Amino acid sequence: MTGPEHYAASETFMRGAERYAEMSETSDPIVKADAIASVTTALLGAQVHATLALAAATAALIPDDAIGNGDIIRAWGSAGAR
């Protein structure tokens, strides 16, 4: 995945967390517990993808010659971080 794709995935997970949060407003304890667990899972997914998007964006700003001979930055580019 590229940085922008990770960012979009993070937003998708956040929308899912919002939907699950709305579901947690029920009086049914089983549905409520399941919704709360789903909110937690969705927020964790959002955090992971947001962190990866930030890492990709940060790496994209480093000049090719800033680290050794540029092999590290080229490796990021070939992995899709642009």
Image (cartoon, helix red, strand yellow):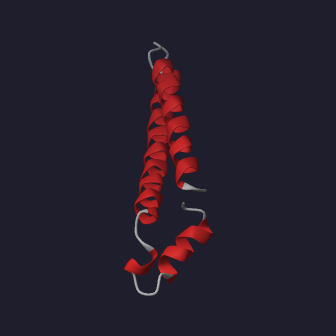
Query: Image height check: is 78 above or below 34?
Result: below
User: Looking at the picture, how far across and down is residue 67, in whole percent?
Assistant: 39, 81
Q: In this rendering, does residue 29 appear at all? A: no
Q: How many labels does the image show?
A: 0
Q: Nearer the viewer, residue 38 or 43?
A: 43
Query: Image point 53% across, 37% down: which residue?
Result: 13
Q: Which quadrant would residue 74 be assigned to in this image?
A: bottom right
Residue most extreme to the bottom: 69
Q: Which residue is painted at 41% across and 63% down in the image? A: 61
Q: Which residue does the image show at 45% across and 24% down from the upper left? A: 21
Q: Position of residue 15 (x, y in %)?
A: 52, 29
Residue 2: where, in percent of width, then height? Answer: 58, 56
Picture coordinates of residue 82, whole percent (x, y): 54, 60
Above or below: residue 39 compared with residue 46: above
- Horizontal side of 25 relative to 13 (left or right) equals left
* Residue 11 vertical position relative to residue 26 in the rendered view, above or below: below
Camera sees residue 26: yes
Residue occupying the point 51% across, 37% down: 11
Quarter of the rendering containing residue 68: bottom left
**51 or 45: nearer the eye?**
51
Quadrant into which the N terminus falls: bottom right
